[in-house]
Image (tube, helix red, strand yellow):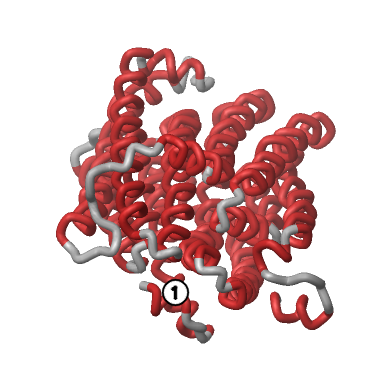
Amino acid sequence: MKALFARPWSRKEFIKFITPSALSILSISLYMAVDAIFISRFLGTLAMASVNIIMPLYCFSLGIGIMVASGSSAIIGIELGEEKHDIANGHFSFIFSFLFAVFSGIIISGYLIGVERLSLWLGATEKLLPYCVDYLNIFLLGIAALTLQMFFEFTIRLDGKPSWAFYTSLVGGGINVILDYLLIVKFNMGIQGAAIASVSGILASCLFGASYFLFTRSTLRPVRPLMDFRFLFNAMINGSSEMISEISSGVKTLVFNYIIIRYAGEAGVAAMSIVMYMFFLLSSLYIGLSMGVAPVISFNFGSKNFEKIRELLSMSMQLTLFIAVLSFSIGVLYGDVLVQLFARGQDQVIPLAENGVMIVAASFLINGINILGSAFFTSVNNGKISALMSALRTFVFTLGFVAVLPLFMGMDGVWLSIPAAEAVTLLVTFYFMMKYKGVYLGIKKITPSTVNSLI
């Protein structure tokens, strides 16, 4: 592990290492998109809209999992870089125990509150409520299991096996898609079939991820948990930016749903769901790149190898800019084709979604740098800055724009709030990268040659 993470990499080696992480997130976004296509084309607009109503709960659970997994793996990576293997293994086992307790707590709390009440709180209309209840009754188990899936994927990457993390996602995604076809198309089980397929995929990923640590010679391994609550607190603070990002996605979806119902009804909510699936699909490579490079940055920050960190950041920026142009081009040139995959024959939904994709596509030129910047600060154990960046991007800027722009521009204002928030966040990202260059990059003074070396 040390020999791999510490030595200089060529661009080919860099791409080879981060590709499994990028493919892992891409596969998740793809099977979510395929899931949505099955629901939209075989179950209709109301079913599609109801899944979007439930999405804030999904984001909440995903946020908890990513917060704890990313925050703890960054600290554990630093511990491994400092050769503190016993402490790293104790913390690894402690985090697993904690997340298993969270998994159980989410399930118990959800059923005690009641899925119908939860659906109403999330904004389900009279037409959507039956779909939401049927879906959430089953999917609540999958929502809870997401916390464990995220933990396994982050720690497997940290252990130097990004390809196994990719297979973890691929197994779950493949099972999800196959069961979607069987349960929705062949057995006509409706939205309950979609929920069963999703839960089965998530649980399969959890089991496959657990098998890595149980049956292979991993660096990280299960031991007696080191009950270190200060470490847990620091991990949660460090990963809070990812938590804020996911929670705010849920809050954003909730607020957007309320506003869109006012302007475009249930068809508008379905259109928003399609646009968000496509947004995640085209942004997934940024997220995968950031997740892939983060453990290597953490390890080298622990060993004070600033030259390696600058090398990683430079290659990450170059690849991010390439993906930005590619994603924007796909959104603009083929957005209407992608919308047709989700909503063929749904005349009310298609024009709304096509217009949304054309406007939101502008954000693809920007959001990759923001995602990379936030992940960088998490990887060097500065969760406060990372959390602030995520909070400004998703809570303050996005919700601020969506509260104001629709008053003047209607639905166009809803769509425009997303790229507008990304553009303002870009300024914040550059500010913090320049401010902390000496601490995390070992750069005392910015010169033209320094700038060129980072891009």
**Viewer-proximal residue among 293 and 371:** 293
Q: Which amino acid does label 1 sit on?
A: Phe
> Residue drawn at (42%, 41%), measured in percent from left and top?
65
Counting other residues with Cα less than 10 Å from the Cα at mark 1, is it few (<14), some (14-19), or many (20 or more)? some
> Residue drawn at (78%, 58%), measured in percent from left and top?
435
Quarter of the image with the C terminus in it: bottom right
Note whether residue 206 is visible: yes
**Viewer-proximal residue among 396 and 336:** 396
In the rendered image, residue 5, in percent from the top left (x then y), is placed at 44, 74
In the rendered image, residue 319, in percent from the top left (x then y), is placed at 59, 73
Q: Quadrant of residue 438?
A: bottom right
Q: Is mark 1 on a helix, strand or loop?
A: helix
> Residue drawn at (61%, 60%), measured in percent from left and top?
372
Residue 173 to residue 95: above or below: below
Tag 1 residue: 5
In the rendered image, residue 192, in percent from the top left (x then y), is placed at 28, 31
Q: In the image, 23: left or right of 196?
A: right
In the rendered image, residue 380, in percent from the top left (x then y), is placed at 57, 57
Residue 220 to residue 230: above or below: below
Q: In which quarter of the image is residue 154?
A: bottom left
> Total label count?
1
Q: In the image, 112: left or right of 10?
A: left
Q: In the image, 170: left or right of 22?
A: left
